[in-house]
Amino acid sequence: MSTHPVLVAGGWRASDATGTFGSENPATGEALPGEFPISSWNDCDAALHAATDAARALRTAPPASIGAFLRRFADRIEARAGELVETAHRETALARAPRLADVELPRTTAQLRQGADAAIEGSWSLPTIDTKLGIRSVLAPIGPVWVFGPNNFPFAFNSVAGGDFVAAIAAGNPVIAKANSSHPDTTRLLAEEAFAALRETDLPASTVQLLYRTSHADGARAVSDPRTGATGYTGSRNAGLTLKEAADAAGKPIYLELSSVNPLLILPGALAERGDTLAGELVGSCLMGTGQFCTSPSLVILFAGDATERFLGAVRERLDATAPTPLLSRAVAKSLAKSVAKLRGAGAEVVTGGAAVEGPGYRHANTLLRVDGAHFLREPRALQTEAFGNVSLAVVVRDEAEAAEVLAQLEGNLTGSIYSDTGGSDDALYARLEPLLRPMVGRLLNDKMPTGVAVSPAMNHGGPYPSTGHPGFTAVGIPASLRRFAALQAYDNVREGRLPPILRNENPGARAWRSIDGTWTRANVSAAR
Amino acid sequence: MSTHPVLVAGGWRASDATGTFGSENPATGEALPGEFPISSWNDCDAALHAATDAARALRTAPPASIGAFLRRFADRIEARAGELVETAHRETALARAPRLADVELPRTTAQLRQGADAAIEGSWSLPTIDTKLGIRSVLAPIGPVWVFGPNNFPFAFNSVAGGDFVAAIAAGNPVIAKANSSHPDTTRLLAEEAFAALRETDLPASTVQLLYRTSHADGARAVSDPRTGATGYTGSRNAGLTLKEAADAAGKPIYLELSSVNPLLILPGALAERGDTLAGELVGSCLMGTGQFCTSPSLVILFAGDATERFLGAVRERLDATAPTPLLSRAVAKSLAKSVAKLRGAGAEVVTGGAAVEGPGYRHANTLLRVDGAHFLREPRALQTEAFGNVSLAVVVRDEAEAAEVLAQLEGNLTGSIYSDTGGSDDALYARLEPLLRPMVGRLLNDKMPTGVAVSPAMNHGGPYPSTGHPGFTAVGIPASLRRFAALQAYDNVREGRLPPILRNENPGARAWRSIDGTWTRANVSAAR
């Protein structure tokens, strides 16, 4: 069995490897065929060298070429959907359908096509023209972007096809993808299609490169290399913070999606009105993808009383009635067990589940833990440990004052949800508690579980640290997610013919919204000016 | 002589000080009256506590109140202009007129009024509405903002009146200002007017607070405190990087303006066409504010030949014919001498000047250094040492290839300028060299010195590291500079009456530009939707 080549400098070639690794089928624990290289710094260096040239060429590439690439790539993914779904299913144990084939793959191709549209349209770059002072500015490509993809979305957040990839490419940058080690074969197939699509356009052949794995030290060196423009990372907090430290020290932007417990606050009126329905919604959301969503509601705040006891009973029943589905990997299973131990050590009691499931593969019992508000306030940090998987913690507060204290202890999160009744009995309480939750979360929801992350221009899949590294940006949503991979560039007194097309008097194809002297318009700069 | 009080928690009160300091008149070296406290952590803690409450109240403050405060503050500055100019002149030795009275003070009040307009109008926050999916997002206040002001603009970048202050307040945040130690009395006067203006509005009394100085350790602790939202810093690279490290480790955004040599490339045609005029322009720009502008052109790239020798001769003559004006402080003079020594040590030769001027106060001879391209390429880092003051370095390159190599070695800068002839003989060379300079600078200029930084919506006073800490943001220019002090907040399925006014169907006063389903408009969300 030979080791798979890496995609570097415009072609598939043998890796200068320091070792190899393979993936497992997490449903069975069996090793899967395929040997993937662990790249040395030489591979990283070669990729950076090629990406630097590609970045220079991409700065003047026609947006139509970028759009054409993203669309051809989407078409090719669809043409190879069967093999992709089968491979991803084997490496992740996520269901072939509906999850992989009917939800995640279409989402992935839709993102690629939205990215194509955004690249061609150009409004994402906030072109700004001051005709009186002769100054014009635009968000321009930032340079080579490293993308580290997570384990939980083998297509939609894949480092060579997912959200960060689309955003970086659509913003005009080459991508050096670092595969997630738990699904290298899926990533290989996607990279084959990306590269084939690329060769059907006139973009530089090094616009997309793929390494499967590097040492941690080489990863840190890569994100802080002078040639690097920026980095997108989705994954565990520890590995992310190591990269962040290196990138920060070199002044290189790094956008991280790290961890989130996604607090969910159920107000008493909502519980009285529709407690049983909410129990169903909550369990559905908590078990989606075996709880391995960045936005899984893992911390549920409830007010003490009979209704809450009935609700928790209903949640328990539903959890017990559902067979636990596999976790993504041995590492996830190990980490989940550790998190549960940490939560229990901090005072959380097991309502149901609480342990790994014996047998082949990696499964953990569907788990509900609980703790009262007073306990939570004694160990607020430990009790916000992310348990990545099918585990949630209910925090039962005595009264409004205790709820407020609990909310005041929250770390930054991607989402926060508040359920209230439809009749208005919760409104006053909502008005008092919402201001405590709002600044701590990137997306606030009403009466809705947070696990759906729509690709909307208004989406925020981001939030205060430690859910991400900067609260001003979103990882999902087009065009806003493109702005992460851009540098602000102003032109002062620059002759018109030397400006990038999007800043010239004539708006190319009248496509981009531009702010001209404070007015957003698709018009040309008028000749009168 | 009693120690001046600090402005903390809604009033002027005695500092919990660990020591005191005073300022000097840099024109004479004499100590100025006034004893200012070095605050302990207790002062920082009290300020953060008060700012947290203020931040909560400001989240729902009417934009009109924020606007009213900024306008009243501007009015009050104008009413006290005479005393402010006199005090700033004494502490900085910058000319009363035109510099302080006719340029910097009007710029400061204009910025405050532009900030007021931006706060009231609201477009800065990029309100985005997706009517189909029921998701809406906006850039919202980030929380208490620390502002560390620089020494070189006692009004326009002052921590209680300048660009960062305006941006943070206009975005809806309280400011904790840390005065620059070289002009504490000027800062005191500005803070008095800020506080008086504040009391004439209904904003929280802790919206503006002032500490004069802290230990370095307390500064690092302040910017990384959990209660801090973000930090704006303008100053030396070393002090800035210490704060950056602390803020980064805590996941707190910090926007820094650190250092820049502002490369200026003069192409042969321009030199032949108008060499003498350019010498005048260059010397004017280099000596503006005794060269103590962030955007001072300190690295001039020229092509070897007779025209360049004539040009450098003309520059030398003009430098020699101009009496050196005082530097801002003893520390600046010391640092400038050190930088000149470092540049000389790396191979730069003195054309003229090169040493401190004997006599009272802090002055350095107007200085021109030169080095050839081959030398530069041997020590590219050392020869990019920022010499903050009236010192510039000419890099004389042999040919285009060497110019390209020099440009490829540039670190990130705030600005880069290219002079070319009007007849077109430089155009081909421009087209080949511009792509090397463009990505390394925040603002690219043609045929214009970089020292003017207009307050334009299209301005970028930012750039790649190490000129700033993040290339996506600008410190000057309204409304863009406000976006630094904001967090992205999405509302998903949130009931309409619970949305912030700017995201509701009815656009308040039809003022803000909002992106509704991809179209920028000032209209309401139509009832039909």
Image: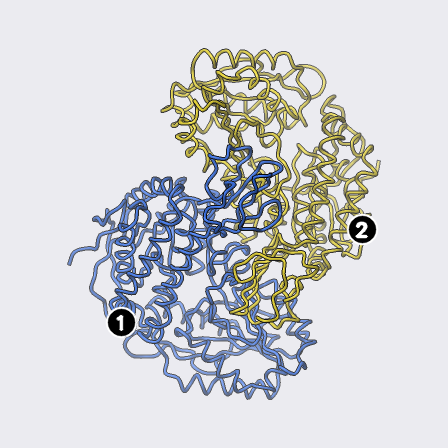
Chain colours: A blue, B yellow
User: If the image is split into quadrants, where does the N terminus of chain B sit?
Assistant: top right
Residue at the image position 28 percent from the left and 54 percent from the top:
A197
Disc 1 is placed on an element classified as loop
Marking on residue B129: none
Q: Position of residue B105 (x, y in %)?
A: 74, 35
The chain under label 2 reads B
Residue highlighted by disc 1 = A29
| Same chain for the residues under marks 2 and 1 in the image | no
Disc 2 is placed on an element classified as strand
Marking on residue B11: 2
Q: Position of residue B102 (x, y in %)?
A: 75, 30
Other-residue count near label 2 (Cα within 10 Å), few / some / many at <14 / 14–19 / ≥20: some
Task: From the viewer's perspective, tell me whether residue B79 is left or right of residue A269.
Answer: right
| Type of the residue with mark 2 | Gly
Q: Is residue B165 visible?
A: yes
Outermost residue toward the left? A1
Please, is residue A89 above or below residue B176 in the view? below
User: If the image is split into quadrants, where does the C terminus of chain B sit?
Assistant: bottom right
